[in-house]
Image (cartoon, helix red, strand yellow):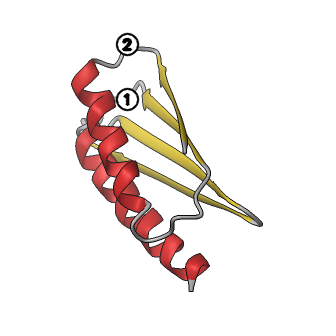
Amino acid sequence: MQIQIHSIHFDADASLLDFVKAKLDKLLTYNNEIQNFEVFLRVEKSDNRTNKVVEVKAHVPGKDLFAKKRSVSFEAAMDEVHEALRRQAIKVHA
């Protein structure tokens, strides 16, 4: 399984990258056919505190999974993305 992480307009630290990778690894327990992930971490310019955006594309043969969430922290947004992708991975696998 391959994971590409792009941090846009900032440099992600190692702990954030490890957190994202750990969350994505857990998705393989729900669908082991996932071949790769492409992750975009973005800070949007906004007056709102909820300006951290996480987008994840996951490729399963014959289907692509996608989730995008916004929150006050990348970790919180990644938790929401993980849950959305978990549901999609179960549907595709069933």
Q: Is residue 64 left or right of residue 15?
A: right
Residue identifier under label 1: 46
Residue 8, image x and y in percent? 49, 20
Q: Is residue 35 left or right of residue 32?
A: right
8 shown above or below 47: above
Confirm whether residue 50 shows in the render: no
The quadrant of the picture occupied by the N terminus is top right
The quadrant of the picture occupied by the C terminus is bottom right
Residue 31, image x and y in percent? 50, 69
Residue at image point 60% right, 77% down: 92
Q: Name the disc covering residue 11, or none.
A: 2
28 shown above or below 93: above
| Image quadrant where residue 2 sits | top right
Residue 71, image x and y in percent? 29, 45
Say what secondary structure mark 2 lies in. Answer: loop
Depth order, front residue of 73/5: 5
Residue type, mark 1 in image:
Ser
Residue at image point 50% right, 44% down: 55
Residue at image point 52% right, 47% down: 56
